[in-house]
Image (spheres, coloured by chain):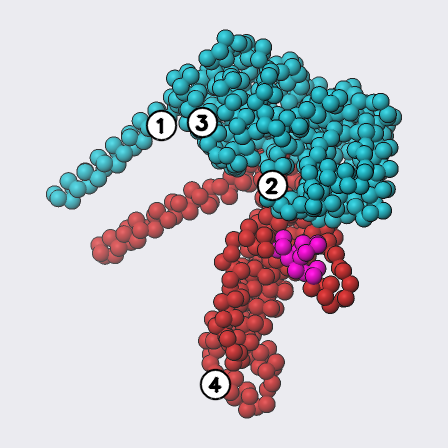
Amino acid sequence: MLKRILSLIISALLITGLFAGCGEKEQMDKKLKVAALSSGYEETMPGMWQEICDAFEKATGIKTELTLEKNLEDVIGASMQGGDYPDVVLLATGREAGLTEQLIKDKNLTELTDVLDMTIPGENVKVKDKLSGGFTESVATNPYGDGKTYLMPMFYSPCGLFYNKGLFKEKGWEVPETWDEMWALGEKAKAENIALFTYPTTGYFDSFFFSLMYAVGGPEFFDKVTNYEKGVWETEEGKTFIDIVTKLASYTNKKTPSQANDQDFSKNQLMVMQNEALFMPNGTWVVGEMADAVAADGFEWGMTALPAVAAGGDSYAYTWMEQIWVPKGAKNQKDAKTFISYMYSDEAAGIFAKRNAVQPIKDVSKLLSEDNKLFYSVYENGAKAAIGNFAAYKSVAGLGNPADYFFAPINSLVSGNITKEQYVNDIIKATDKMRENLINK
Amino acid sequence: MKKHKRQNSFIALCVAPATLLFFIFMVYPTIDVFRMSFFERGAYSPTENYVGLQNFGVLIKDTRFIVACQNTIFLIVAVTIVTFALALFFAACLTREKVRGNSIFRVVFYIPNILSVVVISGVFSAIYDTKNGLLNSLLSIFSGKAVSVLWKSEELVVISIAIAMVWQAIGYYMVMYMASMSAVPESLYESAGLDGADKLTQFFNITLPLIWTNIRTTLTFFIISTINMAFLFVKAMTSGGPNGASEVVLSFMYGQKDAGLYGYSMAAGVVIFLFSFALSALVNKATEREVLQY
C-alpha cells in the first residue's frame, strides 16, 4: 500500500514537472529571442548587447531574451536544425561556418524591405531616411538581386591595406598610389630585407579582392566577376586582375602561408608591426586585436585604400559590414522587425559607438573616437567605397565556396606550388559550375 | 521456475535503459547517416531531394576528398607505427630496467595525454614558430647557421601534425603496455637470462608474445583514435591549410556541412565509417595469434 502511494506521489511530481516545463516554454515564446555574435566589439567592453536589449525594452516594452556567443553558429545551429529559431540574429556572411549563407541559399530568410519604411522607436524618422546611402543596394543586403532586402546592414568598417606609418616616415617612403609605384616600393623594400606584402589568413582577401575588382574595372567588372560571367578572365581587365594578384603573391613574405591559419594568423599581423612586411589587408579591428603585441620602435598604424591601376584612376576601400536578419521560422517576426528598426536609433548607435562599433547611419561620425575618425576618413580622402559580395549559388556536391578557388590557392601561389595558369584554370572551371547554379539567373 | 522467470525479467528491466539509450543515440543516428547520404539537403532546410548514389560518385572524384584520404591514411600509418614503437620501448625501459626517477618519467610521459588539444596546438605553435621556435632554434644550434624551416608549410604540415599526435599519444599507450608487462612473471626472464638470452632477445621472445593480446586491442584503439584525433589537431593547429594541404577526412566532412551540403557530408561519413570498420577488422585478422598462457 505504502509503495503504491509513494509511486503515485512520484508520478504526480513528474507530471507537474512536465507541465511546469511547458509553462516556462510558453513564456519564453513571448519574449523576443535575440541571438548575436559576441565579436571583438563585445569582447573589448562586455555588456554592449545587454545594454541594447535593456534600452530596447525601455523604449518599446518588448521583453527580450539574449543569446550571446562567440561560436554562435554552434549554439543556434543545433536548435535551428530542431526547428527552434531565434527571432532576430546578428551574424554576418563570410564566416567559416557559413550559417547565414546557407539560409540565403535555402531562401530561409524573412523579407525585411518593409523595415525600411518603419519609424524608428522613440524617434520620428523612418529607417530609410536615417540610413547612409548605398548600404541597402548590394548583394550583401539584397542577396537575390531583385531589389528586395533580406538582411539589414549593421556595424561597418572600412578595410584597406594596413602598414607601419612610422617605418614609412623613417625611410622616407611614400604610400603608393598606383600598382606600378607599389612594385617599385617592393623592390626598394626587398633591398632592405622587408617583404612588400603579407596577409593574416587567405580569408582576409575578400575585402582585398572586392576592392581590387572595383579598382581594375569599376562596378561593371565587379558585377561580372561576382556573377561568374563567362569569359571574364580572358578580358583585358580579367588579365590585369590576375597579374596583380600573382605578382603580389611573389612579393609576399615566404613565411606567410605557413602561418595563415586560425592559430598563427596574429604572427602574420605581427610582421607588419615588426617591419618584416609592409602591407596587409585588414580591418579597423586589428588595432584593438594587436594592442598588446610588441611592435618595432616608432610603430604607428596607418591605413590606405588599394592603389589605382593607372595614375589618376580610382582607388577603392572595401566596406566590411555585418548583417542582422530574421529567419523564416521565427515566431515573433513583428517584434523582430521593430527590434531591427531600433538598431538605427541614436540611442542604440550611441551604445554601439562606445565600443567603436559603427552603425551605417547619417551623422555617425560625430560619435566616433579619434583613432577611428582617422580610419573612417579614408573615404573623405578620395577613396571610393566598394561594397558587395559573390552572388549566391545553389550548393553542389564537390563545388566549394568562391573562397576555395579565389583566396585559398594564394597560399600555394606564394609558396610556388601552383602556377598562374593553374590558378586561373581552376577559377574558370569552378565559376562555370557556379554560374550554372546561380540562384537568380 | 518462477524464480528464474522473475530473475530474467529483472535483468531485462535493468539493461533496458542502457539498450534504449544505445539505440536512440547510437544505432538510430548511424542508420540515419546512411539514409541521409542518399539525399541532398542543407543543414537548416527541411526539404531533401533523393539523389541516389550521386553523392558517392562525386565524392570519389573530388580531389579535396582524395587529398584528405591520403593525409588520413598517412597519419594512421605513421602515427601508429611511431607511437607503437616508442611506447613499447619506453614501457620496456621503465618496467624492466631500474631507471632512476622511474615514476617521474611515467608522469612526464603521461602529461600530454591529459592536456586538451587546444593547449597542445598552442604549445606546438610555439615549437614550430619559424623565427623563435624551439625546433628551429635547436636546429640552428646544431647546424651552426640560422635555420628557418617552415613547419606548417604545404610540404611539411602533415608531418608536423603527426609529430604532435605522437607526442600526445605515447604516454597513454605506454602506461597500458607497462601494466601488462609488469604482469609477466619475473622467473621467465631469469631463466632466459641463465640460458644466455640478451635483453633484445628477451624482449622479442618473451615480452612481446606475452602482451600480444594487449597490443591487438590497442591497435584497434589506434586506428579509431587517430581518425578522431587527427580532426581535432587539424582543426586547432592549421584549420586544414595551407590551401587544404592538411585536410583530413573528418575535417573535410565537417567543412562540407558548412558549405550547405549535408547529404554530401554524410556520404563522406559513410565512407569513413566503412573504412575504419574494414581496417579494424583487417588489423584484427592480421594480428591473430595463439593466445599464450603463463
* Image location of residue A212, percent across then percent down: 77, 28
In 3D space, how far apart are the residues under numbered discs 1 and 4 (Cα atoms)?
69 Å
Q: Mark 3 points at which residue?
A: A51
Q: Which residue is drawn at 51% across and 87% down?
A: B190
Which of discs 1 and 2 lies nearer the camera? The answer is 2
Q: Which mark's residue is nearer the viewer, 3 or 1?
A: 3
Q: What residue type is labelled 2?
A: Ala
Q: In this view, does A30 lie above or below A205?
A: above
Q: Name the amino acid, label 4.
A: Ser
- x, y percent for residue A318: 70, 26
**Residue bearing mark 1:** A25
Q: Could you classify mark 3 by the number of other residues whose Cα lies within 10 Å: few (under 14), some (14-19), or many (20 or more)?
A: some
Give the colour chain B carries in the figure: red
Residue B133 in magenta stretch: yes
Question: Gap in Å between the C-alphas at discs 3 and 2?
Answer: 25 Å
Among the chains pictured, the one given cyan colouring is A
Question: Which chain's residue wears label 4?
Answer: B
In-image side of A272 versus B290 (left or right)? right
State the mark number for residue B80.
none
Name the front one of labels 1 and 4.
1
Query: How far separated are the C-alphas under marks 4 and 2?
Result: 66 Å
Q: Is residue B232 above or below residue A371?
A: below
- Judged by depth in the image, the label closer to the viewer, 4 or 2, is 2
Query: What's the residue type where badge 3 is placed?
Result: Glu
Residue visible at 48% across and 78% down?
Answer: B184
Front: mark 3 or 2: 2
